[in-house]
Amino acid sequence: MSGREVFLSPHPDDAVWSCGIELLGVAAAGARPLVVTVFDGDAALPGEGWRRVATPALRRAENAAALAQIGADALSLGLVDAALRTVGGAPIYADAQALRGPLATADRALPVVIAARLAAVVHAGDRLHVPAGGAGAHVDHRVVRLAAAGIAAPQRHYPDFPYAPRRHPAAADAVEPWIAAAALYRSQAVGLFGNRAALAAALRAWNGDSDVTAPRR
Ligand SMILES: [Zn+2]
């Protein structure tokens, strides 16, 4: 039995926004990639503004629709997004900037918890696609990378949008199906970028398309 291509998605849009081209490539080759979404569970904290631009239920529904369109299998781990995690009823991260800062004390056990969940999912021969989770990336991306480091499987670190400066440029004919699938995360496109056209422009720039202005960093 050959192994699967398993994509770890911290949030319900990450695998498709960052790796949609690779997911579509696996599906086009006749296999079904598996997308494991980690932080997509319901939260006790209602959240508003930067903490939550859509309910976890809506985000799970958008994820299911996008992965079905791509032809990927989906698995939810159902943990709570960092912006909505609490300890003693109080949010762990005080503001949006804190999500890009050090791992909170209350979160220190999370990588081990997630690694144990992943170990039950990953088979021998599977290959993991893991968010790069570099310095300044969302804390949930860094936690998933730490968790994956505890799994005995071959792994590739993928540039994670929008934290990594850019992806490896893909050919134009691969870009359009990716953009179409990415747009199915409508709540996040509107909440984070203003509208779906702006998300599409950001993804094209991130792919290094020459006819758009790429963000400099
Ligand atoms: Zn994310």
Image (cartoon, rainbow, N blue to C red):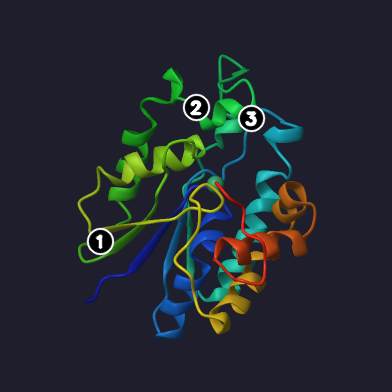
- Could you say whether the residue bearing mark 3 is in a helix, strand or loop? helix
The x, y position of residue 209, in whole percent, is: 59, 70
Mark 1 or 2, nearer chain start: 2
Mark 2 or 3, nearer chain start: 3
- Could you say whether the residue bearing mark 2 is in a helix, strand or loop? loop
Q: Examine the image and state in which quarter residue 26 appears.
A: bottom left
25 with respect to 196 (left or right): left
Q: Nearer the viewer, residue 136 or 2?
A: 136
Distance from Cα at disc 2 to Cα at disc 3: 9 Å
Q: Nearer the viewer, residue 165 or 111?
A: 165
Question: How many numbered circles does the render carry?
Answer: 3
Q: Are the two marked residues, 3 and 1, in contact with CB atoms closer than 8 angstroms?
A: no
Q: Please tell me the numbered disc located at residue 123.
A: 1
Tell me if residue 191 comes above or below residue 124 in the rendering. above
Distance from Cα at disc 3 to Cα at disc 1: 36 Å
Tell me if residue 94 comes above or below residue 19 in the rendering. above
Q: Nearer the viewer, residue 169 or 123?
A: 169
The residue sitting at 70% across, 38% down in the picture is 52
Query: In what quadrant of the picture does the N terminus appear?
Result: bottom left
The x, y position of residue 190, in whole percent, is: 77, 53
2 with respect to 47 (left or right): left
The residue that label 2 is drawn on is 101
Task: Give neighbour class at mark 1: few <14, some 14-19, many 20+ (Cα, 10 Å).
Answer: some
- The three-letter code of the residue at mark 3 reads Ala
The x, y position of residue 33, in whole percent, is: 41, 70
The residue that label 3 is drawn on is 96
